[in-house]
Image: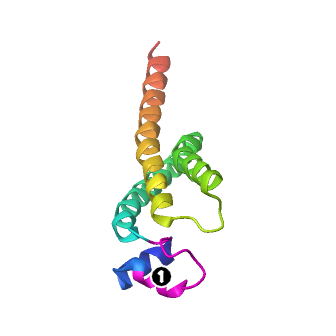
Amino acid sequence: MAFLALQCLAHWDVESFLKDKFRGQSMPDAFNDLNNALPIFTIFLFLQSLLAYSLMRSSKLEFLIPLAAGPVLGGLCYLLRDGVSDPNWCELFTILTIGMLVSIPVTLILVRIRANSNRILRSG
C-alpha cells in the first residue's frame, strides 16, 4: 500500500508508469483507466484502514470480519471470473472500491446496533 501511495505521488500518470515497467509482460489494456480508479480506491482504502484501526483500538475485533468481507469477496469473485494470470487492474480496483463502499457503512451500522443493544441490556 505504501509503494502504491508513493508511486501515485511520484508519478501522477500511474498507467504510463506501469505500462513502461511491465511492457511485454501484460496485456496492452491491463492498466487502462487506472488513473481514474486509483484516487477513489485510495480514499476508500484510507477510510477502511482508519475504521479498522479504530475498531482494533476499541477491542471490537469481531467487526473486522464484515469490514473486510466486501473487498475480499469482490476480489475473489473477480479473480475466479477472470483468472489471476493477467487481470484488468482498473476493473479489479473498481470492484474492490465497491466492496469497501458497501462494507464500511455496514460495519458502522453493526457497531451502532451493538452499542444500542448493550445500552438496552444494561438499563433493563
Which of 59/21 is in front? 21
Please report the bounds of the magenta region as a residue range. 16-31
Crowdedness near tag 1: few (<14), some (14–19) or many (≥20) residues, C-alpha within 10 Å: some
The amino acid type of the residue labelled 1 equals: Lys
**Residue 107 screen position, x and y as percent:** 47, 39
| Figure disc tally | 1
**30 is within the stretch colored magenta:** yes
Q: Residue at x 46, y 35 (%)?
A: 111
Q: Mostly what secondary structure, the magenta segment?
A: loop
54 displayed left or right of 24: left
**Residue 22 screen position, x and y as percent:** 55, 83
90 displayed left or right of 35: right
Q: Residue at x 50, y 47 (%)?
A: 55
**What residue sits right under mark 1 in the picture?**
19
Q: Secondary structure at mark 1?
A: helix
* Residue placed furthest toward the front: 28
**35 is within the stretch colored magenta:** no
Q: Residue at x 37, y 84 (%)?
A: 11
109 displayed left or right of 86: left
**Residue 72 screen position, x and y as percent:** 58, 50
